[in-house]
Image (spheres, grey):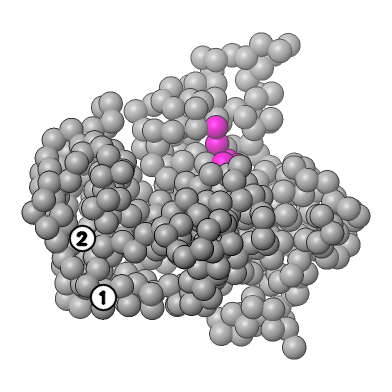
Amino acid sequence: MIRARAISKRFGANLALDAVDFTAAAGEIHALLGENGAGKTTLMRILAGGLRADSGSATLDDAPLQPGSPRAALQAGIVAVHQSPMLFERLTWEENLALGGFRKTRGPGLAAAATAAAALAERLGFELPPPGSLVESCALAERVRLELLLALSFDPRVLILDEPTGVLAPAEVSAFLDLLRALRGQGRIVILVTHKLAEAFAVADRVTVLRQGRIVATLAAHQTGEAELARFMIGELSPARETITYSDRGSGHLLEITNLVLDDGGQRRLDGITLALGPGEIVGLAGVEGNGQIELVEVLAGVRRPTTGEIRAGELAVIPQDRDRDGLVLGLRLWENLILARPLRKRFSRRGWLNRTTAIEFAGGLMQRFSIRTPGPQVMAATLSGGNRQRLTVARALASAPQVIVAHNPCRGLDLAAAAAISRLLSGFAAGGGAVLLISSDLDELLTLSTRMLVMSGGRLRALATGERDPARLGLLMAGKWN
């Protein structure tokens, strides 16, 4: 059994954990739920040795865990998979995995580690990157898969998972949940930090809910339901989201893409993409990660130059899927991150001089408007929880007054209330005459918000027929079965 007793942790004026007691037993999958900023990740990092608690203690089988020591936690058999992958980006994926438990496999060098990783990946239905790929060149979904493989390579007694399925395809999620059940059957402890209640009910034996740094409920999964857990998490249920209806608010298109091709090292990442978005539309783009979505976003953002093709767009803002690497500069303050958007920077600058006072005041107003929980706009972005970082990224995109928003997994890792709030913001933006290209791994999110849908596979697009919304059919199309 792993046990935390009276754990408290403060970050400046923010009390992240307040005398938390938590236990998880051998042969148990224990789901840890709560709003973004409720303290879930902080508790997870303390148990895994990445943070030192201000007070309290933690034990595994009644043996004290050395506080603030990831090495000691790993030696005790505790392994954590973080929401943002923590791999060495300038190494290949084989080198990263060889630094983990795969190095214990028979045979010298990277080949043995890669062979062992491939065998495990096949069991999970994970597709590995091309041999020799640097991690920095891998899509977020690929990096998440590598992080999961790395964690499992240590043969952990305690596996702590922070939102592990956010960018996995439906088939991968199913295989992954089966793996968790198998680990439970071997007598291991699995702590699943998630906001996806359906997944928690699918595998969890017990559920603990954190709210504002305190435990508000610990229940057997079969004794509760989604409505009750949502009330524990957020106090009241958010109103159901409604699919908006397409309304042409003007002639012409806000975004037009014609025959877009991107060749990368002899591989065609984008293959003849043609797409148009009109005012009032939310166009949903489904697909298994790694099929050209990130390349499409990078081309639209101006980060990559296409091989051929044409793009016509009004003012465009991007909500990237990797908020830590592509969305924010974690070493800058919140107000500084906000004015990284060119329209906002121009708004608060005159003749090359930045009006800091006005920019900070404006940032404070956005903090309130978008419910970003922080002591103020002067704090560093690195101090925010994952959900608040995501709100900050969305706030900047909307505040820059674009005509088009490209949103890539905008609700990844968010709790129910935060995801519903961002969905309402995107719906409101479209209803006001904007256009949204919504690229998501979450089929429920796409089916709820999209006015029409596309599927991406192998760098190509396919438009769904009007009213074609069957999840099983969508899953086949995402897997490339278009015939």
Foreground tag (1 vs 2): 1
Up-down: is 92 above or below 475?
above
Residue behind mark 1: 186
Q: Residue at x 31, y 61 (%)?
A: 156
Q: Residue at x 26, y 60 (%)?
A: 158
Can residue 83 be seen here? The reply is: yes
Can residue 391 be seen here? The reply is: no
Residue 254 included in the magenta stretch of the image = no
Q: Where does the image place residue 99, in percent across and percent down from the top left?
A: 47, 50
Q: Where does the image place residue 235, in percent across and percent down from the top left?
A: 25, 55
Distance from disc 1 to disc 2, alpha carbons, whole Å, reads 22 Å
Q: Residue at x 75, y 42 (%)?
A: 303
Q: Residue at x 27, y 39 (%)?
A: 69
Q: Tell which of 279 and 129 is nearer to you.
A: 129
- Element marked by disc 2: strand
Question: With 284 as the anchor, is 323 left or right in this view?
Answer: left
**Quadrant of the rendered image containing residue 397:** top right
Magenta extent: 325-329
Specify the principal SS of the magenta part.
helix
Q: Where does the image place residue 108, in percent across and percent down from the top left?
A: 53, 58
Q: Which of the image's four quarters has the N terminus?
A: bottom left
Residue behind mark 2: 208
